[in-house]
Amino acid sequence: MSSKSPLTSAAPILSGDRGGYSKAKPLAARLGISSRTLFRWADAGHINRHKVNSRVVLFNIDETFAFINDTRVGREQSVDHHQELDVEELDVK
């Protein structure tokens, strides 16, 4: 059994200067929410999901953080993912 955490195994980012894309589970873990919450937001049209194949769905990190910041009640406490989110910690695609 490997002791390597899924959050420490980084894959290449698909987009150059943007935040890239991440699978639901590592992105949700970083945000402190359930991965199901990301799918609910996508179902409601708040964020887009990008289906790569029948088993892989990716979420745009910038879009997800923008949605959170736009809907946050205390907007002065916005989340800046470029400072708080170490993209290499995510399983980004």
Image (cartoon, helix red, strand yellow):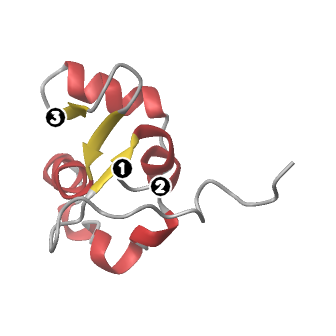
Q: Residue at x 24, y 56 (%)?
A: 65
Which residue is most to the bottom? 83
Q: Earlier in the sequence, mark 3 or mark 1?
A: 1
Of residues 59 and 78, the one drawn nearer to the viewer in this rendering: 59
- What amino acid type should be assigned to the residue bearing mark 3? Asn
Secondary structure beneath dot 3 equals loop
- Viewer-proximal residue among 38 and 51: 51
Res 5 quadrant in image: bottom right
Q: Amino acid at mark 2?
A: Asp
Q: For mark 2, what is the residue?
A: 91
**Residue at image location 51% in from the left, 67% down from the top:** 89
Judge the density around disc 1: few (<14), some (14-19), many (≥20) Cα neighbours within 10 Å: many
**Which residue is the site of mark 3?**
48
Find disc 1 in the rendering and name its residue.
Answer: 22
Three-letter code for the amino acid on which mark 1 is drawn: Ser
In-image side of 17 versus 93 (left or right):
left
Q: Quick check: marks 2 and 1 in contact, CB under 8 Å?
A: yes
User: Percent from the top left, x then y, of residue 87?
Assistant: 39, 69
Looking at the rendered structure, the secondary structure element under dot 1 is strand
